[in-house]
Image (cartoon, rainbow, N blue to C red):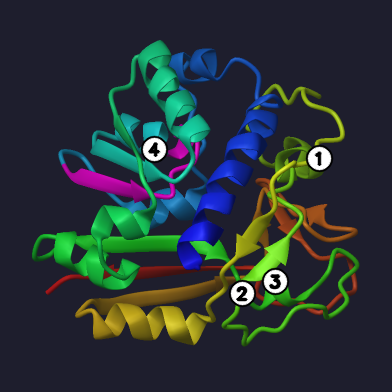
Amino acid sequence: MKQDLHEANRLSWNAATVAHNSHKGDQAAFFRKGGSTLFPEEAGLLGDVTGLSVLHLQCNAGQDSLSIARLGAEVTGVDISDEAIDFATRLSQQSGIAARFVRSDVYDYFRDAQARGVAQLLKPGGRFVFIEFHPFALVFDPAWKFHYDYFNEAPVPEEGVGDYVAESGDGLVREGYERGVDNFSNPHPSFEFTWGVGQVMTALSLAGLVIERLDEYPYANGWKPFEGMRDIGGRRMAPPEGMPRIPLMYSISARKP
């Protein structure tokens, strides 16, 4: 049952979140000094959020949520992981940046499919913004060999959420990367649910949202999932020299009429 798979993911993310945060040093001090974890593409998608209510879905441990709150928004973060939400709540208190965090599977939070849930929650004129690693890039294994189906409607079993923060080094840590947990092995398996760009766009459109922008990027912000990835500036990670450019990340901006 899908609920069983979601529960497996909750346990796997709980374990992985501890490993991820072990590499990030004193995050409360980072925020107290004015730090932000947002990449320029994310800040650009958000625009001016002063005085707006922002719901941050799958907020993980709250770093981006607090960065958005610092821009003047009233932020609620939602995530499936108890560990992530507990950490985010503590980080909000210790950094002095106000935000609210809720532990919930997004499907339980909306009690509907995600696109319809977003559309129902938005006020007229409200916006949905989304940036994610491109599903085309996820067909490769770490050696750039085709391995996974792009058109895959079945959950993909994995050994567990990995320590992609350690694998990316300082790519996903704005400053003060620490070794932290070494050679992390997740004791809990996980399951990947993948959707193509067409499926995502169609779901949002059928939910009544007006798609304003779809952008693709030939790099991945901070993440180094494949061999030979290089920083082309600003922690934008691109394929090795000489490899044809492919979409590694994409973003959507949609509005409720």
Which amino acid, by three-letter code, is at mark 3? Answer: Leu
Image location of residue 248, percent across then percent down? 66, 68
Residue 174 is left or right of residue 42, and the answer is right
Q: Residues within 10 Å of mark 1 (few under 14, many from 20)?
A: some
Q: Is residue 218 visible?
A: no
Q: Quadrant of the C terminus?
A: bottom left
| Mark found first going from the N terminus, 4 or 2 | 4
Q: In the displayed structure, would residue 13 be above or below residue 85?
A: below
- Indicate which label's residue lies in the foreground, 1 or 2: 1
**Residue 124 percent coordinates (x, y):** 8, 65
Which residue is found at the position 53% from the left and 46% from the top? 10
x then y, percent, for residue 167: 80, 44
Cα–Cα gap, marks 2 and 3: 5 Å
Q: Which residue is mark 3?
A: 138
Residue 135 image position (x, y, % from top left)? 61, 74
Asked if the residue under mark 3 is in contact with the one under mark 2, i.e. CB atoms within 8 Å, the reply is yes
Q: Earlier in the sequence, mark 3 or mark 4?
A: 4
Identify the amino acid type marked 1.
Ser
Residue receiving disc 4 = 65
The residue indicated by pointer 1 is 185
Disc 3/disc 4 C-alpha distance (Å): 25 Å
Mark 1–mark 2 Cα distance, whole angstroms, equals 25 Å
